[in-house]
Amino acid sequence: MENQIDLGRLRKSEWIGGIIYWPIFLFGAPLLAALAVSALWPTADAALWLSRTNFIYCLINAAALVLIFFRYLKAQLLRLQERGWRLFADLGIGYAAYYGLSIAAGYVISLLMQLFSTPYLNANQDAVEESLRVLPVLVILESLLLAPTAEELLTRGLIFGTLRRRSRILAYALSMLAFSLAHCVSNLPYQPFAVTLIDVVTYLPAGFVLAWVYERSGTIWTSVFLHAVINGVALLLQAAIR
């Protein structure tokens, strides 16, 4: 199985660029986005400011990573064309797997909440719901285009694609963990360990399935598209509930 599908190799410059960008992604880009919005797009409305900052953060990441991985993305696009109509099967099976694993993760989360006697609210989900209220068009852009591209390049393209040649288990484990932590690292100083643990579990199903469809299809674009589908369905559900 390991050698049946070649995921394509990153050039040394792309690998180094991706490694260097990880701390920027986690810490530098959020600060830069906050400074840019405060200076160039200011507002006294806290919800509006946060929504603008999140959008600029996603825009910075997507632009920087597309620049770093441009050759890789172009090569992966050729692989996507070779995949043809099988892409739709990849997306359908992938979303079904995600849905099933999310239900299982929900049971684990319930057990953790009972074990630690703690309530749980997903801070990221709350932020998205608030942003949908004030800047829906920008939220759609960042959720369906910017965030999936940036996150897939860093977690699946860089981490999973590189480690898979050495150990599939390690590739899945580290890419899933990195994906989960990337979604909750900004909240670490403000929440208990139990909440962070639940946050990690919440994102593990997507982390696994996105790596699996990447491996199944042989192109990073499949995981980008599935990531967009997962985010899009979540947005539709949030809009319907409002």
Image (cartoon, rainbow, N blue to C red):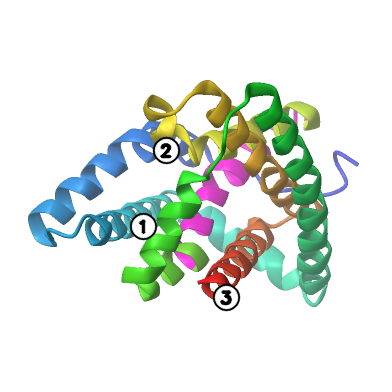
Mark sitting earlier along the chain (2/3):
2
Report, in whole angstroms, how far the alpha carbon at label 1 lies from the one at label 2.
13 Å
The x and y percentages for residue 46 are: 22, 55
Question: Which residue does the image show at 70% across and 23% down from the upper left?
Answer: 115
Q: Residue under label 1, please give it.
A: 63
Element assignment for label 1: helix
Q: Residue under label 2, please give it.
A: 17
The one of 6 and 192 positioned closer to us in this rendering: 192
**Does the image show residue 43?**
yes
Please name which of the two marks, 1 or 2, marks the residue nearer to the observer: 1
How crowded is the residue under tag 2: few (<14 C-alpha within 10 Å), some, or many (20+)?
A: some
The kind of residue tagged 3 is: Ala
Q: Residue under label 3, please give it.
A: 240
The one of 8 and 99 positioned closer to us in this rendering: 99
Per the picture, the main secondary structure of the magenta-coloured stretch is: helix
Q: Quadrant of residue 120?
A: top right
- State the extent of the magenta-drawn residues as a range: 145-167
Q: Quadrant of the N terminus?
A: top right
The x and y percentages for residue 48 are: 25, 62
The x and y percentages for residue 213 are: 76, 54
How crowded is the residue under tag 1: few (<14 C-alpha within 10 Å), some, or many (20+)?
A: few
Report, in whole angstroms, how far the alpha carbon at label 2 lies from the one at label 3.
40 Å
Residue farthest to the right? 1
Element assignment for label 2: helix
Residue farthest to the left? 39
Mark sitting earlier along the chain (1/2):
2
Report, in whole angstroms, how far the alpha carbon at label 1 lies from the one at label 3.
31 Å
Question: Which residue does the image show at 39% across and 73% down from the upper left?
Answer: 136
Mark sitting earlier along the chain (1/3):
1
The kind of residue tagged 2 is: Gly
